[in-house]
């Protein structure tokens, strides 16, 4: 998990910074990446994040894993809820979904002078009016994966024993299509591992 979701989440976190006692970071998506990011924030001593996800089961998993709050993005007052739970508009938002709807929510929630990191590759186009980027003094960054140096730092953190495991379920390789369909439908909690046949 560490070279995949761990490194991806760690590299995104480095772009916003994790400071003990600081305002919570807003994470969009409580799948494998979001839950890994939550564990990394905890391991780094950061303030527990606020997490947004459309799936109530994933929101509950994030709550049980230690999120400061979980929010349904479809709530009509989602942006107000985010501000209330983050003690003001968040200065850092990481979008692990990367869809038009999540980009819109993340940008609307972002505080003035904040940084918005987009990791997810769901697709679509940026939904914001261009003048708002300047008026918000917003920084928008992409994050795909991390560097070799990032991975070295992540492994040191892992060796310390401070990164908790995220929910993981194994499946036989023959179920690959079923697992991919479940992933597409948002039914995979955490991570799914495909294992080859026993020899």
Image (tube, rainbow, N blue to C red):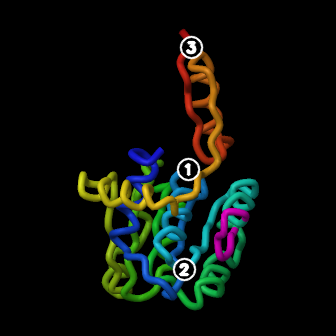
How many numbered badges does the structure rendering display? 3
Bounds of the magenta segment? 64-71
Q: CA distance from mark 2 to mark 3?
A: 42 Å
**Residue 9 shows which numbered tag?**
none
Q: 116 and 125: which one is in front?
A: 116
Dot 2 or dot 1, earlier in sequence: 1
Q: Residues within 10 Å of mark 2 (few under 14, many from 20)?
A: some
Helix, strand or loop at mark 1: helix
Return the residue at label 1: 32
Q: 81 and 168: which one is in front?
A: 168
Q: Is residue 96 left or right of residue 73?
A: left
**Residue 197 shows which numbered tag?**
3
Helix, strand or loop at mark 3: loop
Magenta-colored stretch includes residue 129:
no
Which residue lies most toward the top here? Answer: 199
Helix, strand or loop at mark 2: loop
Which residue lies most toward the front here? Answer: 160
Return the residue at label 2: 47
Q: Is residue 159 left or right of residue 21?
A: left
Residue at figure coordinates x 50%, y 83% from the top left: 90
Dot 2 or dot 3, earlier in sequence: 2
Q: 174 and 77: which one is in front?
A: 174
Residue at figure coordinates x 56%, y 13% from the top left: 197
Depth-wise, is mark 3 or mark 1 nearer the camera?
3
> On screen, 173 above or below 110?
above
Q: Residues within 10 Å of mark 1 (few under 14, many from 20)?
A: many
Q: CA distance from mark 2 to mark 1?
A: 20 Å
Residue 55 x/y as whole percent: 70, 55
When asked about the image quadrant of residue 150, the answer is bottom left
């Amino acid at each position: 998990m560490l070279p995949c979701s761990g490194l991806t989440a760690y590299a995104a976190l480095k772009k916003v910074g994790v400071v003990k006692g600081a305002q919570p970071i807003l994470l969009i998506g409580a799948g494998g990446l979001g839950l890994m990011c939550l564990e990394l924030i905890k391991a780094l001593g950061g303030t527990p994040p606020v997490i947004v996800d459309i799936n109530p089961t994933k929101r509950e998993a994030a709550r049980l894993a230690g999120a400061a709050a979980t929010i349904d993005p479809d709530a009509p007052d989602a942006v107000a809820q985010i501000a209330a739970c983050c003690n003001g508009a968040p200065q850092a938002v990481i979008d692990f979904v990367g869809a038009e709807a999540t980009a819109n929510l993340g940008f609307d929630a972002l505080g003035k002078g904040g940084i918005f990191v987009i990791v997810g590759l769901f697709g679509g186009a940026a939904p914001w009016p261009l003048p708002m980027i300047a008026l918000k003094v917003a920084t928008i960054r992409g994050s795909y994966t991390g560097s070799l140096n990032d991975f070295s730092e992540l492994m040191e953190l892992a060796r310390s024993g401070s990164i908790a495991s995220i929910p993981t379920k194994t499946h036989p390789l023959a179920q690959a299509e079923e697992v991919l369909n479940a992933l597409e439908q948002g039914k995979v909690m955490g991570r799914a591992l495909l294992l080859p046949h026993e020899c």
